[in-house]
Amino acid sequence: MPNKNLYDDGKPYLSASCYYKSIYGRKVYKLSLTASVTCPTRDGTLDNRGCIFCSRYGSGDFSQEKTKSIKEQIISAKRLISNKYSEDSYIAYFQAYTNTYADASYLRSIWEEAIVEEGIVALDIATRPDCLGEDIISLLEEFARKIPVTVELGLQTSKEESIRYIRRHYNNQVYEEAVKKLHDIGIHVITHMIIGLPGESKEDMLRTADFIASSGSDGIKLQLLHVLKGTDLCDEYEEKPFSLPSLEEYTDIVISIIERLPRHMVIYRITGDGNKADLIAPMWSTDKKRVLNNIHKEFKNRNTYQGKEYHGL
């Protein structure tokens, strides 16, 4: 007898692949693209140091060189994927830095350049909630009439002390208002959350998950805190090492978070890929297959699933 708590792909949570298949009828792959943008926490507008954990790639460790045109980047990214897959449907994913922190006319030109390429079925834009002015919202609405558009917001945490620590420079209300503005124009929203920030307890992280659920975000990306070379976080860690989650602790937190999320929320990521050459800690995270297997095994051991502890917020 089928388990009604499992999704179509047999997983106990609504995975990105399962969601994409329900929308497009087939597998869809993301092409990581780089625009000529920066962040207000890097250029001196809010700060000049960037977020404490952010690498020199602007959280786009697998993005491409800025010197290439968008067309060249898409061709190159497709070539990499074609070595592994025979699919021809892709999402143009502007990942590194803040991809709405630029003049609207420039953004229009690069987004247009991306969506006209063969096989592109959707647009995905990673940004900050405080970089969604009226001109950007109008531009997103314009593109949403042409092609499905997703906006990814880097919330990371809802804990006030952690917000200051990571140098996020906007409050939780700004995030909530951004989700509403994006939903009002038909944009799918994904929220990023970091697991393992110094000073955060499991209860703190569960509160962040509850906050994301209450915001109405359509999806979530869970990311283990990576200590990467060249970051201020790395300097702090090397001077005075702080505790990071073990694989077992991380597994427990991920499952506890997913249990609290509504059944319709897409779980886009349950672990992240850092640049192995730059990773200082935790080294167990380099074995992605082991991490995923451990999480799936523990889901089964606990006989649990997405939404089991969700009661509406």
Image: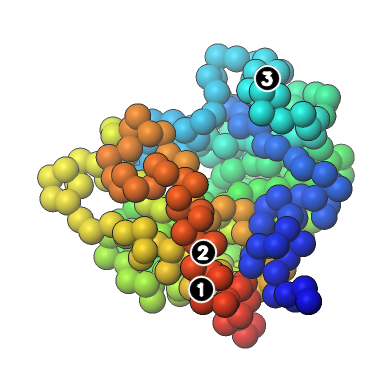
Whichever of callouts 1 and 3 sits on the residue coming sooner in the sequence is 3
Residue sitting farthest toward the bottom: 311
Gap in angstroms between the C-alphas marked 2 and 3 = 34 Å
Residues packed near mark 3 inside 10 Å, few (<14), some (14 to 19) or many (20 plus): few
Q: What kind of residue is marked 3?
A: Arg
The image quadrant where one finds the C terminus is bottom right
Tell me residue 233's x, y (percent): 27, 45
Q: Which residue is mark 3?
A: 79
The residue under the point 62% across, 72% down is 306
Where is residue 78? Give x, y as percent.
70, 23
Asked if the residue under mark 1 is in contact with the one under mark 2, i.e. CB atoms within 8 Å, the reply is yes
Quarter assignment of residue 183: bottom right
The residue to which callout 2 is attached is 297
- Earlier-in-chain disc, 2 versus 3: 3
Q: Which residue is mark 1?
A: 301
Circle 3 — which element?
A: helix
> Can residue 222 be spotted in the picture?
no
Q: Where, by quadrant of the figure, is residue 69 drawn?
A: top right
- Can I make out residue 309 in this image? yes
Helix, strand or loop for disc 1: helix
- Tell me residue 292's x, y (percent): 51, 54
Camera-side residue: 5 or 50?
A: 5
Question: In this orientation, which residue lies closer to the viewer: 313 or 174?
Answer: 313
Q: Quadrant of residue 266?
A: bottom right
- The structure residue drawn at horizontal position 59% and vertical position 43%, both measured from the top left corner, is 126
206 and 255: which one is in front? Answer: 255
Question: Is the residue marked by circle 2 packed among few (<14), some (14-19), or many (20+) residues within 10 Å?
Answer: few
In the picture, measured across the screen, residue 251 lies left or right of residue 63, that is left
* Color encoding of the figure: rainbow
What residue do we see at 32% from left, 60% from top? 245
